[in-house]
Image (spheres, coloured by chain):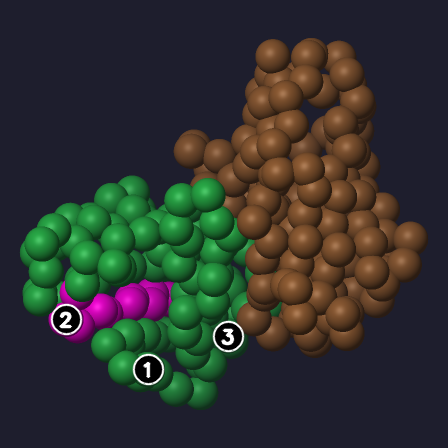
Amino acid sequence: DQQVKQNSPSLSVQEGRISILNCDYTNSMFDYFLWYKKYPAEGPTFLISISSIKDKNEDGRFTVFLNKSAKHLSLHIVPSQPGDSAVYFCADGDDMRFGAGTRLTVKP
Amino acid sequence: DAGVIQSPRHEVTEMGQEVTLRCKPISGHNSLFWYRQTMMRGLELLIYFNNNVPIDDSGMPEDRFSAKMPNASFSTLKIQPSEPRDSAVYFCASSLSREKLFFGSGTQLSVL
């Protein structure tokens, strides 16, 4: 059973709008989460992380929110750009297990 | 630093053959991970090593899969015998003290 779940396989948004990618986890003991971005024919690259002592972490256009009571985290991209089109993975920082990924397409 | 280096980049083999994938982690990193990416399951953790010692191999799908890390600068993932359902992209990643991972470019494996 997957410990980290991304239930939306794909998301399409218009350039300039907000992209929201979601991730749920099962183990309430997890205290560190990461988001990775993957372009075709490349390995995933680290994007942003969050520790459970925070409920929000921001880096430029990227913000990750953590809701511990709901065991849910989300990645917000504002404004979305065509270059953001990629597959996004969330992962728990304890077991280093990844969700199935969400393919984001940002349309010009 | 050259980053995590994986070889070969592409591998095409026939069912029943032995396949060996190779990985050179970033110098100084003490954790190494092997992942498999498929459309159905996304990125699956197969095994990870800490200081060259296998810590968690619960993701290794079958006895046909084995991984070794003889030293801090080299690891192999072997499939013997290979089957068509093993076709996937295999990634190696390394990290320092289980912080963020640095991935290689992957090996695209096709088993015919």
Asked whether residue B58 is drawn in magenta, I would say no
Q: Are marks 3 and 1 in contact (CB under 8 Å)?
A: no
Give the SS element for disc 1: strand
Q: Nearer the viewer, residue B59 or B112?
A: B112
Residue under pointer 3: A32
What crowding class fits label 1: few (fewer than 14 Cα within 10 Å), some (14-19), or many (20 or more)? few
Residue under pointer 2: A79
| Magenta residues, start to end | A70-80
> What's the amino acid at mark 3?
Tyr
Looking at the image, which residue is at 42% across and 33% down? B39
Label 3 and label 1: CA atoms lie apart by: 16 Å
Looking at the image, which residue is at 44% across and 75% down? A49
> Between disc 2 and disc 1, whose residue precedes?
1
Q: Can the viewer see residue A6?
A: no
Counting every numbered tag in the picture gives 3
Q: Position of residue B28 (x, y in %)?
A: 77, 74
> What's the amino acid at mark 1?
Asp
Residue B65 horizontal side relative to residue B85, left or right: right
> What's the amino acid at mark 2?
Pro
Q: Nearer the viewer, mark 3 or mark 1?
A: 1
Q: Nearer the viewer, residue A58 or A108?
A: A108
Residue B43 vs B33, above or below: the answer is above
Label 2 and label 1: CA atoms lie apart by: 13 Å
